Image (cartoon, helix red, strand yellow):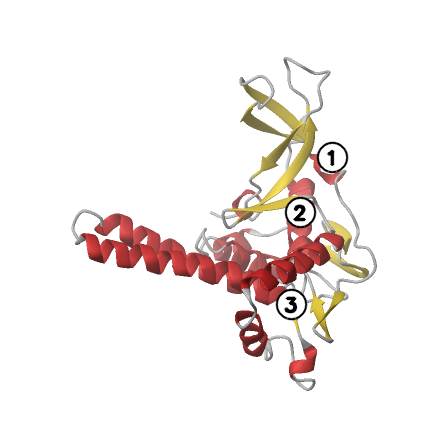
Amino acid sequence: MLCEFSLPSNPEITVRLREATVADAIDFSAVDPECEEAATTLFLERVQVGPGVSNPREWTGEDRRYALFTYFVNTTTYRAIPLTYTCSLCGKQHTQDIALSRILDEYTPIKDRALREFPWQGHNVCVRPLTGADLEDVEKYRYDLLLSEQALTERRGSISADEELRLQSAIMAKRVRMAMFRILSCIDMPYLDEHGTPRSRRGEVENVIKAMPASQFRDFAGRVENAIADMRHGLRTSYMNGRFYLEIPDVRCDENPELPGVLLHYPFRFVSVIPTL
């Protein structure tokens, strides 16, 4: 066994990982690099060892990223990662070695359980962190969006202005749909069908949201965001442009070390962890 840890979202679940083999690496090499969540699921299914093996699709996204980083820490020969960035304090470019332990220091276990509720128009709305299954679904939307953007780039110059405008509008609609889907995936309204499941109710939840006045939706979305923030767990991360980044706070400027530090974002990709050939 390589390492053992508890899930950040549920300390009662213990996960044990072994090191991947060459045979595993061959299978991992067949996964499209753009399909990070699918690759993460395959990897975590493959390298888990018993007892108590659990389904990584049911883990939160934070659980999965923490598992990958823990595997990385236990298999890499490096104790630090070099990050190059343009300093917002002095305007110069710096390269700093960030200790892996510094990233692990940002670890936070969840407060209570991975569920929050708030009242809305006489009913309770349930908010949960995105699971691995949810993230795989979001990733499919993102992949479809990527293909559409690539197709437009390739066709630009050979199509009419009207056709280009139509394709741009379709791409914008897909971006909005992906953002909406991320919200839908983390909320549930059990009163809509008490005998159903969060996934089976998702269509009805979407109809409720679409019927909201725009000003009301802003308030609703704010409550959802607050609930997600209150469930922060695992490593400190940001979601930007369809990707997750590990956060490293208070990195001091070489020229002005006495000033408060800046926040860096480390693009921790699955290809940095999962062995391939």
What residue is at 61 percent from the left and 32 percent from the top? Answer: 264
Residue 175 located left or right of residue 22: left
Which residue in the structure is indicated by mark 3? Answer: 187
Name which residue lies at 60% across and 20% down: 89
Q: Of 137 and 6, which appears nearest the observer?
A: 137
Decide: few, some or many residues near mark 2? Use Cα within 10 Å; few <14, some 14-19, many ≥20: many
Give the alpha-carbon distance from disc 3 to disc 2, as whole Å.
30 Å
In the rendered picture of this protein, how many numbered marks are placed on residues? 3
Q: Are marks 3 and 1 in contact (CB under 8 Å)?
A: no
- Spot occupied by residue 138 in the image (x, y as percentages of width and height): 52, 61
- The nearer-to-camera label among 1 and 2 is 1
Observer able to see residue 133: no
* Amino acid type at mark 3: Ile
Callout 3: helix, strand or loop?
Answer: strand
- What residue is disc 2 on? 71
When the figure is inspected, residue 9 is found, relative to residue 254, above or below; the finding is below
Question: Disc 1 or 2, which lies upstream in sequence?
Answer: 2
Dot 2 amino acid type: Tyr
Rendered location of residue 167, percent (x, y): 29, 57
User: Is 200 situated left or right of 174 in this image?
Assistant: right
